[in-house]
Image (spheres, helix red, strand yellow):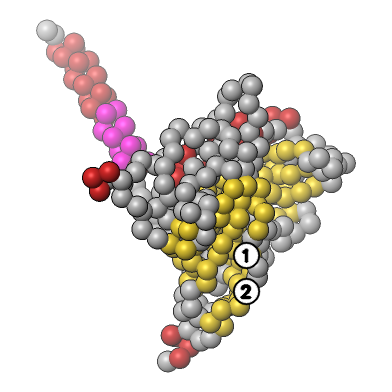
Amino acid sequence: MTSGVRGVVCGLALLLISGVASGVNAQVASSTRYLKGQSIQPAYEGWEQNPDGTYSLWFGYLNRNWAEEPNIPVGPDNNIQPGGPDRGQPTFFQTGDAKRRQYFAFKVVVPADWPKDRDVVWTLTANGTTLKAVGSLWPVWLVNGDVISANRGAYRDTDPDSVNNPPTITEAPKDATVPLGTPLTLTMAVTDDDMPKRRSSGQLPGAVGGVARREPAGPGGASPRQPSLRDSLRVSWVQWRGPGRAKFDPEVVRVADDAGTQTGTAGKAGTTVTFDKPGTYMLRAYAEDMSLFTLSDTITVTVTGASTAQLR
């Protein structure tokens, strides 16, 4: 082999090694988890037309922090225009594997004569970085139940002979006032059409009429089989706004009848919530079957008393 050929081979080898190294570095960078100090990406999910002719523009977000849950009040750093700055967006941004990306989190309703080329813009500044989500009624952004199901549900119901309707919230918790440190019980009643059909059935381990209890043992002491939470009619609780942290126990609850049996048609889901600071909190819940969901109205909780820091 001549020296010229050896030089070409060596050069190719160096390029190959460099390419592999840069690829590895890119993979490492993309998989790095930052606990705090990162941005929050607002997201436009798409639009639906409502029965009265108005339109709902759906928004969500991605919290890039794996530990930090920023609280960004409505104002210059958290505003939606036109018609804002307050269009019902969250001010508390959750994190964690299942919560940092909130799909179809809330909607902004615009009139029936809203121009298709007029934007609704959510501007969000977190840790010094300003990002925007731009929503419009362009046809490419039209969404339906299949799109929502593919993002929030366990799977899409593709059977053309069946129709899946979203759950209905028949009873929701009222606004409340509680002292700091006192757990508040929240119970939501839900009905559904039992579609799509669950992959399996079983006994609920969580609640009887909203009260926690042990799961009954099956033959030989084994626990009866039950579907996963994503394969169940359930209620998912989220903190929407508030000066501190609202902790739900649990955050996601199967809907059960009074006997504690998981149901796909009617029942209740109960949880408790505690707060770490006094002030006004806004909570919301998603009643979800395996495919679609219904977003509850906002539940306002006023927490009274002084925090530990204020008592010092």
Residue furthest toward the left?
1
Where residue 11 appears, x then y in whole percent? 23, 21
Residue 175, picture quadrant: bottom right
169 horizontally vs 40: left or right: right
Callout 1 environment at 10 Å: few (<14), some (14 to 19), or many (20+)? some
Provide the secondary structure element on which disc 2 rests.
strand
**Is 28 contained in the magenta span?**
yes
Q: Is residue 292 above or below residue 235?
A: above
Residue furthest toward the top?
1
The residue that mark 1 highlights is: 173
- Count of labels shown? 2
Amino acid at dot 1: Pro
128 horizontally vs 202: left or right: right
**Is 83 contained in the magenta span?**
no
Where residue 301 appears, x then y in whole percent? 60, 72
Residue furthest toward the right?
113
Front in this rendered view, residue 2 or 267: 267
Residue furthest toward the bottom?
312
Q: Tell me which residue sits at (13%, 8%) in the image.
A: 2
Viewport quadrant of the C terminus: bottom left
Q: Are marks 1 and 2 in contact (CB under 8 Å)?
A: yes
Provide the secondary structure element on which disc 1 rests.
loop
Q: Tell me which residue sits at (65%, 52%) in the image.
A: 169
Viewport quadrant of the N terminus: top left
Q: Is residue 303 above or below residue 30?
A: below
Q: Tell me which residue sits at (75%, 59%) in the image.
A: 84
Q: Which residues lie in the magenta part?
A: 19-30
Secondary structure, magenta segment, majority class: helix
Q: Alpha-carbon distance for marks 1 and 2? A: 8 Å
The residue that mark 2 highlights is: 176
